[in-house]
Image: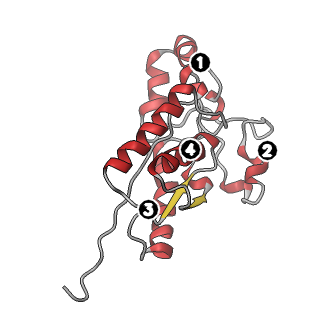
């Protein structure tokens, strides 16, 4: 049908298990590598995408190495390692604030199951913020030096993440609306 809109495909791929996931630590924006299991998960994702016969025009990923490596491994397994990859901090996972690096079980023992669950699962209650002078604050990470520090979170609830990512998605659609497979 002439003039019909083209329908594209959006694939959302979570990073494989990280070394901190394996240790049951709050990870957030702390940059840790994939575990051996995470590498295998990324390779398996590539096989699944290959079996689905998907071809990609562009891939977007966060600035976190576990997400970058998951994409690299999946694309290599898929046979599309030459696909353009764009990195954007707004695709980073949720910033867990002062909880980053803490053991989840110990946090539950210290703060109680109800409070820990509220921080982890509620839509609009963030964990305690990380101190601005902490190495865990993104304003102290050179990867974010080009970003206005006021835009960088010290903690996030799911509501904050949704707002950050939806804003990025709308921008990406406006810029790359003609691409068919992202």
Eye-nearest disc, 4 or 1: 4
Eye-nearest disc, 2 or 3: 3
SS type, badge 1: loop
Residue beneath disc 4: 67
Q: CA distance from mark 3 to mark 1?
A: 37 Å
Q: CA distance from mark 2 to mark 4?
A: 21 Å
Residue 37 horizontal side relative to residue 128, left or right: left
Q: CA distance from mark 1 to mark 2?
A: 23 Å
Residues tagged 4 and 1 counted as in contact (Cβ below 8 A): no
Q: CA distance from mark 4 to mark 3?
A: 17 Å
Eye-nearest disc, 4 or 3: 3
- What's the residue at 58%, 23% (across, down)? 25
- What's the residue at 72%, 36% (across, down)? 136
Residue beneath disc 3: 56
Query: If the image is split into quadrants, where does the C terminus sit?
Result: bottom left
Q: Nearer the viewer, residue 127 or 86?
A: 86
Residue 148 position within the rendered picture, expressed as x and y whole percent measured from the top left: 73, 59
- Residue 174's disc is none
Quick check: 127 above or below 78? above
Earlier sequence position, callout 3 versus callout 1: 3
Q: Nearer the viewer, residue 100 or 10?
A: 10
Q: Nearer the viewer, residue 119 or 36?
A: 36
Residue beneath disc 1: 103
Quick check: 71 above or below 1? above
Residue beneath disc 2: 140
**Mark 4 residue crowding within 10 angstroms, few (<14) / some (14–19) / many (20+):** many
Residue 147 location, quadrant: bottom right
SS type, badge 4: helix
């Amino acid at each position: 049908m002439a003039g019909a809109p083209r329908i594209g495909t959006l694939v959302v791929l979570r990073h494989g298990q990280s070394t901190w996931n394996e240790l049951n630590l709050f990870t957030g924006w702390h940059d840790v590598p994939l575990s051996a299991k995470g590498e295998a998960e990324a390779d398996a994702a590539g096989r699944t995408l290959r079996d689905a016969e998907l071809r990609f025009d562009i891939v977007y990923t966060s600035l976190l190495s576990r997400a970058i490596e998951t994409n690299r491994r999946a694309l290599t397994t898929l046979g599309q390692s030459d696909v353009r990859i764009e990195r954007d901090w707004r695709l980073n996972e949720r910033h867990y604030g002062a909880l980053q690096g803490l053991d989840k079980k110990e946090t539950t023992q210290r703060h109680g199951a109800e409070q820990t669950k509220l921080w982890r699962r509620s839509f609009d209650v963030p964990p305690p913020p990380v101190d601005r002078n902490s190495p865990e604050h993104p304003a102290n990470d050179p990867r974010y030096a080009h970003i206005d520090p006021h835009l960088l979170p010290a903690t996030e609830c799911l509501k904050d993440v949704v707002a950050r990512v939806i804003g990025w998605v709308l921008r990406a659609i406006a810029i790359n609306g003609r691409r068919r497979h992202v």
